[in-house]
Image: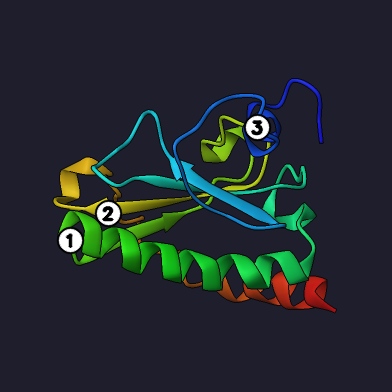
Amino acid sequence: MSEKCVFCEIAHGRIPSIRVYEDADFIAFMDINPISEGHLLLVTRGHYPKTTDVPDAILDKALTLAKKLAAATLLSVGREDFNLVVNNGPLAGQLVKHWHMHIIPRRSKDELPLKQGAPADLTRLPFVAERVRENLR
């Protein structure tokens, strides 16, 4: 647990939340600033700032749990489409430095506008891919 981390405080019951699920590794609760009806946060109980800090076993469990929570949420709010969003660091829009996943039911594209990127420089793309492959080793 990290002092002054709002999600650690919520996970340990020191700040109230509207919980929909909890186990030894996670808590899921309603977002108090929802993008759409049913917007949930899935939060690790352990304090991990980014995805790259989370143990693999916890991450494996996170996606399975997100699938289950999304299905229940979509059924509950009468939607079919949704986003799973994990922001990693301030440049990526992460506001709380504690790993969490947004489960966001969608009604329209306007709720969470995503824009398509510009076409890649195909002369540069293979070199970037090679650097990624090298760093996977």
Q: Are marks 3 and 1 in contact (CB under 8 Å)?
A: no
x 54%, y 27%: residue: 16
Mark 3 is on which residue type? Gly
x 36%, y 55%: residue: 117
Of residue 11 and residue 92, the one placed in the foreground of this image is: 11
Left or right of 42? Residue 75 is left
Q: Position of residue 20 (x, y in %)?
A: 45, 50
Mark 2 is on which residue type? Pro
Secondary structure of the residue carrying tag 1 is: loop
Q: Which residue is mark 2?
A: 105
- Toward the right, the furthest residue is 137
Q: Which residue is mark 1?
A: 79
Q: Are marks 2 and 1 in contact (CB under 8 Å)?
A: yes
x 80%, y 63%: residue: 55
Mark 1 is on which residue type? Arg
Q: Which residue is mark 3?
A: 13
Residue 23 found in image quarter: bottom right
Label drawn at residue 113: none
Secondary structure of the residue carrying tag 2 is: strand
Q: CA distance from mark 3 to mark 2?
A: 26 Å
